[in-house]
Image (cartoon, helix red, strand yellow):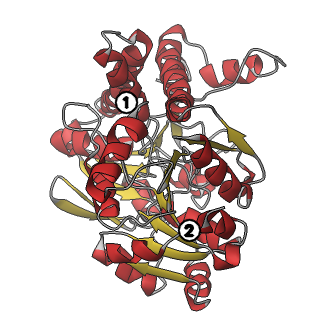
Amino acid sequence: MSHQENTIHAPSTTKVGVVGLGYVGLPLALLFLQKGYQITGVDIDENKVKNLNNFISHIPDIENSELEQALSSGKLRLTTNYDVVKSQDIIVVCVPTPLTSQGNPDLKYLKNVSEQLALRLQKNQLIIVESSTYPGTTRDVVQPILEEKSNLRIGEDFSLGYSPERIDPGNKTMKVEEIPKVVSGLTDRCLTLLTRFYENIFEEVVTVPTVEIAELSKLLENSYRFINISFINEVAMLCDQLNINVWEAITAASTKPYGFNPFYPGPGIGGHCIPVDPLYLYWAGKQQGFHHQFLSLAEQTNNYVTRYVVEKVKERIERDKGIDNATILLCGISYKKDSNDLRSSPGIQMMQELVQLGVSVQYHDPFVPEVIVGGAEYKSIPLAGSVLKQTDCVVILQDHSPVSMKKIMEEATLVYDTRNATKGWEGNAEVILLGGGMSSL
């Protein structure tokens, strides 16, 4: 039995390195710490690491006090120096896997991490990739880099597996460890070691036969959401023409106890996963000469719905004045409720398009104090009554919990609601609801 097999059974003596301290890596590092492991976090972003070591969290789900307590325990250290991975028993990779400007998979971060690890790889180490990617990446990209640059062999000298991350930022109802964990390995021994490790962390571990299945499962989950959210956005735009309230129709359909899962409209899909992962799957199909029509259509619809909202706001304002003389307040510009994540945020896209139209744009977001759009810096403004009264239209993009819908409805004159957040609130504001029917337009 190897040294590594023993350490996986004893968290207090097992050292775990987490590479990438973003929305996935940092929560996982703290979870591993809670389970008794000694944790070293690595990130190439010097400012991020500096702030974290000064107890400043960049993730709303993680309080500064939680970070301070973790670092003060002496069992968590954060650094930019890759050399620390030499002393780790297990290394979990959580780096971004974005798209290129052509919409193809961009594995530069994952490849770079693989090269850095390979130069420092030790016998009996377990490497786990959690970054979302297309089927075949772990076997065909990561494994060759690790073996060729280290002169070590998988299954004999070290172990490698894949486990898709399932972190849900802003989710207050379910803990990370309560989400079933899908795991896979390049060899039987790899799978055994990976399973034993995650069984100490998660309440349920789901093993699958190959890493390709695990990689595909992540893309399947997010492609399912991508297609269905894009579909309901298309239905919402249709309902504006049919004079039917799509929100009420969804509520009615949701009473069916089988065969229907509700998805809800919005100004567009953002984040690192849902708008990105399906295109990894689309690209993988294209390499085999397969055209995934559902994903192609979903992407077109998702790209269009943000422009649709801008156009509807423009049409309504131009009844009273020129759009280039208008003032618009965007409420919630992060891509997700109660999150500060701006990656692929439709709010940023909408701000850019409105500025190009000559609109004076302001925004309010309790989770995003400032943002740079088109080279200009914008700061979140308070929802003061005077601001709301002077604004030609308030566009609700996210229904953040701290935002007072009561104040918006009482003080604003015109509200375009993309989230049905004004439902149940009364006031003086005229409300236009995305998918609310022509009566609201």
In the image, residue 316 sits, relative to residue 131, either above or below, namely above
Q: In which quarter of the image is residue 31?
A: bottom right
Q: Is 123 in front, or is 341? A: 123
**Residue 104: mark in rendering:** none
**Residue 86 visible to an observer of this rendering:** yes
Mark 1 is on which residue type?
Answer: Tyr
Mark 2 is on which residue type?
Answer: Ala
Q: What element carries label 1?
A: helix
Q: Is 220 in front, or is 123? A: 123
In the image, residue 190 sits, relative to residue 430, either above or below, namely below
Q: Is 318 in front, or is 53? A: 53
In the image, residue 174 sits, relative to residue 56, either above or below, namely above
Q: Earlier in the sequence, mark 2 or mark 1?
A: 2
Q: In which quarter of the image is residue 306?
A: top left
Mark 2 closeness class: few <14, some 14–19, many ≥20 residues within 10 Å: many
Mark 1 closeness class: few <14, some 14–19, many ≥20 residues within 10 Å: many
In the image, residue 429 sits, relative to residue 11, either above or below, namely above
> Which quarter of the figure is the N terminus placed in?
bottom right
The residue that appears at 55% across and 50% down in the rendered structure is 337
The residue that appears at 28% across and 31% down in the rendered structure is 318
The residue that appears at 57% across and 58% down in the rendered structure is 403
The residue that appears at 48% across and 44% down in the rendered structure is 396
Residue ID for mark 1: 280
Q: Position of residue 115 (x, y in %)?
A: 28, 57
Q: Where is residue 144 in the image (x, y as percent from the top left)?
A: 32, 44
Q: Distance between the residues labelled 2 and 1?
A: 26 Å
> Would residue 315 appear left or right of 323 to someone viewing this image?
right
Residue positioned most to the right: 257
Q: Position of residue 399 (x, y in %)?
A: 56, 48
Residue ID for mark 2: 29
Q: What element carries label 2?
A: helix
Q: Position of residue 101 (x, y in %)?
A: 19, 36
